[in-house]
Image (cartoon, rainbow, N blue to C red):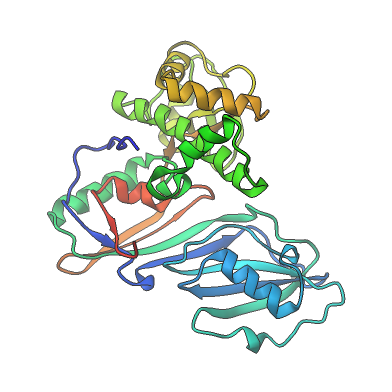
Amino acid sequence: MTPLPLAFGGPLFTRALIRSTPDDFQVDELPSFEPTGEGEHLLLEIRKRGANTVHVAKLLAQWAGLPEMAVSFAGMKDRHAVTTQRFSVHLPKRVAPDLALLASDEVHVVSSTWHNRKLQRGALAGNRFKLVLRDVDGDAAAIDARLQQIAERGIPNWFGEQRFGRDGGNVPAALAMFGGRRMRKDQRSLLLSAARSALFNRVLAARVEQGSWDQPIDGEVWMLDGSRSVFGPEPWSEVLAERLARFDIHPSGPLWGVGDLRSSDAARALELGAIDDEQSQALRAGLEAEGLKHERRSLRLRPALLQHQWLQEGVLELSFALPPGCYATAVLHELGPVTDASQ
């Protein structure tokens, strides 16, 4: 895939390693609701190490003696990491097997309680990350300054490489699907998301290269912070400038689908120009044929509670929180090339 541009200048190191051990990549889900304490869905908070979400869901189904569809989770979490996330298990008779049977090197049950609804995908307020980069070959003072810039201005809200599969293979697979290749339902959903994400990243890349990823241009569609609500275009004003400065609103880009773009003028011209190549046109046509509706996504992301410390020379620890659907790799991207040691 085409390398993504940087918002703050060149990379600050020539190399760094992430996931040298699973403990170097820690993620905790931030819950979006409190359990009711009653109902027929057992809500489990699980700390997992070196196991992916689907694998743990299968273990829970086997433990409960239920089909896999009886187990649900809010979000997918990495395998090569230590992560805490919620799962729900539908137990209509409210009889749960012994939780101690789940204990292993991979799985630890942090808490369990009853809830009156199945856990839905996306039912989380965000994720909190603690990452350790090792063998960092760069100037520590410059990295400190870049992280301060990120804390103050935010970063481009890229879709991460996870969305595109190994070696970016999901986009070619989406094109093949649009060309008639049969795919399973779960594969189709994954590939539709990859196609939309690729188009969004191309628009965002054009805004980064223009220097307007966090600045207004004519015809802008604005997104409210912390929501999917949008408004505009409307004339630039002191009120909009104040809201943009305090991160109450953000410029947005298209998640492609059926219908007309909401943006106008310079914003619309840039969006259409960024996705006018042959591959982008094929992705656009495929998404429209699938009946997806136009949506928007914020171009700007500000990591919350961003902190860092040097554990020793060449070893950098970062901690921050991100909203749902945002990627820690977008933060790392603004520092320099990071190699995934788990690969």
Q: Is residue 196 visible?
A: no
The residue lying toward the viewer, choosing from 286 and 75, is 286
Marker count (numbered): 0
Q: Is residue 272 visible?
A: yes
Query: Residue 23's spot in the image, x, y percent?
Result: 37, 73
- Judged from this view, the residue extending furthest toward the front is 181
Task: Specify whether 134 is left or right of 196.
Answer: left
Residue placed at 34% from the left, 61% from the top?
343
Residue placed at 56% from the left, 20% from the top?
232
Query: Residue 342's spot in the image, x, y percent?
Result: 34, 65
Identify the image quadrant of residue 261: top right
Residue placed at 20% from the left, 44% from the top?
11
The residue lying toward the viewer, choosing from 134 and 124, is 134
Task: Specify whether 74 is left or right of 80.
Answer: right
Query: Residue 145's spot in the image, x, y percent?
Result: 20, 49
Quadrant holding the N terminus: top left
Q: Considering only vertical position in the picture, is 337 above or below 153? A: below
The residue lying toward the viewer, choosing from 125 and 45, is 45
Task: Specify whether 21 is left or right of 321.
Answer: left
- Judged from this view, the residue extending furthest toward the right is 93
Query: Residue 69's spot in the image, x, y percent?
Result: 74, 62
Residue placed at 38% from the left, 71% from the top?
22
Task: Specify whether 322 is left or right of 66.
Answer: left
- Judged from this view, the residue extending furthest toward the top is 265
The residue lying toward the viewer, choosing from 238 and 225, is 225
Q: Considering only vertical position in the picture, is 161 above or below 96? A: above
Q: Considering only vertical position in the picture, is 102 above or below 178? A: below
